[in-house]
Amino acid sequence: MHVIVIANGAPADLPAPKRVPEADLIIAADGGAANARRLGCTLSIVIGDMDSIQAADRHELEAAGVQFITHPPKKDATDLELALRYAVEQGARTITVIGALGGRPDQTLANIFLLALPFLDGVEVSLLGSGWEAFSVRHGLHLDGRPGDVVSLLALTPEARGVTTSGLYWALDDATLQFGSTLGISNEMTERTARVSLCDGILLVLRSV
């Protein structure tokens, strides 16, 4: 099952509506409901403590039959984490996260680091933004694009070991990328498909679009 989760990130970072893929279920993380409206997405569920969603938006969505799953303000997880956990509980095998970046830097970093949590192991998770896309990679990835597209690889764990690539200008062969290292920044696709694999750890692979 493919689930889209829309977060409350900066509207300027949203992808064009035509780039939003089809999904079996669309969830908004609290104020992400406003971003769903901007994208023209039909929501099924809104999850969070409801401190960010506008009253008018909530009233309209409730009238349309959208389900609200409300959590207390004093909670131990962000609205986006709650939405991701719910998606996995519903059987999601693929999750596209939209609206995860922009605004507060702590929230932006937390949204990215969520991709390293164990409950997402076995789930294909991608982030979709304005002019870019990103994927969390635990084993391997076939990346479709165009020659010249900028591709960056960042470790989301202390080390990402056994990193091997093809279809990129600067190839890696059984390399180790350390968390915080810039070794994998600003590579470039040389073919329409690039391949990235690793033996241990988690990578964040970003591509300009």
Image (tube, rainbow, N blue to C red):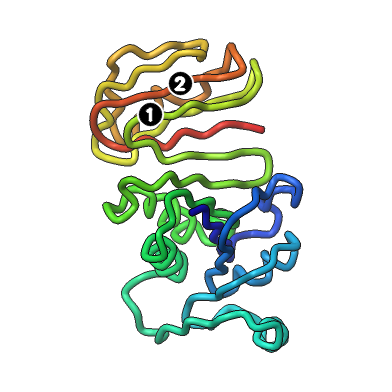
Question: 147 or 195: nearer the eye?
Answer: 195
Q: Which residue is the site of mark 1?
A: 140
The CA distance from mark 1 to mark 2 is 7 Å
| Location of residue 27 with respect to 122 vertically, above or below | below
Q: Do tag 1 and tag 2 residues touch (Cβ < 8 Å)?
A: yes
Of marks 1 and 2, which one's residue comes earlier in the chain?
A: 1
Residue at (69, 59) in percent of width and height: 11
Classify residue 60 as left or right of residue 75. right
Point out residue 83 in the picture as x, y percentages from the top left corner: 45, 67
Numbered tag placed on residue 195 in the rendering = 2
Q: Secondary structure at mark 2?
A: strand
Point out residue 165 in the picture as x, y percentages from the top left corner: 41, 17
**In which quadrant is the C terminus drawn?**
top right
Where residue 119 sits, quadrant-wise, is bottom left
Give the residue type that dot 2 points to.
Arg
| Location of residue 81 with respect to 54 vertically, above or below | above
Classify residue 75 as left or right of residue 168. left
Residue at (46, 33) in percent of width and height: 205
Residue at (46, 21) in percent of width and height: 195
Total residue callouts = 2
Classify residue 176 as left or right of residue 148. left
| Location of residue 52 with respect to 129 vertically, above or below | below
Point out residue 49 in the picture as x, y percentages from the top left corner: 47, 82
Give the residue type that dot 1 points to.
Gly
Question: 92 or 141: nearer the eye?
Answer: 92
Point out residue 46 in the picture as x, y percentages from the top left corner: 55, 75
Q: Residues within 10 Å of mark 2 (few under 14, many from 20)?
A: some
Question: 111 or 96: nearer the eye?
Answer: 96
Residue at (42, 50) in percent of width and height: 93
Q: Residues within 10 Å of mark 1 (few under 14, many from 20)?
A: some
Q: Secondary structure at mark 1?
A: strand
Numbered tag placed on residue 23 in the rendering = none
